[in-house]
Image: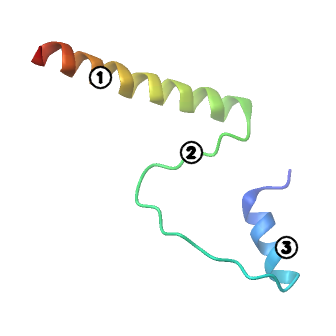
Amino acid sequence: PFGFDDLMLQMLQDGQVVHVYKHEGLWLDIGRVEDFQKAQTISWEEQSASIEVAAAAA
């Protein structure tokens, strides 16, 4: 497979300019089905927790 890291290395080898952004939050690579499913599970758990907090505050 050709990953994002491979893309960056190829661009550098080709002499292209590569910029970076320091991300402080959670990063999930969803390029594979199992990774996408994991991201969905995490998202659902976070949404469920937010809904419970909002319901308790009402």
Mark 2 and mark 1: Cα distance apart in space: 19 Å
| Disc 3: CA contacts within 10 A as few (<14), some (14-19) or many (>=20) | few
Whether pointer 1 and pointer 3 mark residues with C-beta atoms closer than 8 Å, the reply is no
Q: How is the image coloured?
A: rainbow
Which numbered dot is residue 49?
1
Whether pointer 2 and pointer 3 mark residues with C-beta atoms closer than 8 Å, the reply is no
Q: Residue furthest left?
A: 57
Residue at the image point whose x is 68% and y is 30% from the top: 34
Mark 1 and mark 3: Cα distance apart in space: 41 Å
Tell me the kind of residue under disc 1: Ala
Q: Secondary structure at mark 1?
A: helix
Q: Which residue is mark 2?
A: 28
Where's residue 50, x and y in %? Answer: 28, 24
Which numbered dot is residue 41?
none
| Disc 1: CA contacts within 10 A as few (<14), some (14-19) or many (>=20) | few
Where's residue 16, x and y in %? Answer: 81, 82
Q: Relative to residue 36, is residue 22 drawn left or right?
A: left
Q: Mark 2 or mark 3: which comes first in sequence?
A: 3
Q: Relative to residue 6, is residue 48 drawn left or right?
A: left
Where's residue 25, x and y in %? Answer: 41, 53
Q: Which residue is mark 3?
A: 10
Tell me the kind of residue under disc 2: Leu
| Disc 2: CA contacts within 10 A as few (<14), some (14-19) or many (>=20) | few
Q: Give the position of the C terminus as an image quadrant.
A: top left
Q: Relative to residue 35, is residue 45 drawn left or right?
A: left
Q: Mark 2 or mark 1: which comes first in sequence?
A: 2
Tell me the kind of residue under disc 3: Gln
Residue at the image point whose x is 50% and y is 24% from the top: 41
Q: Is residue 18 above or below residue 54?
A: below
Q: Secondary structure at mark 2?
A: loop
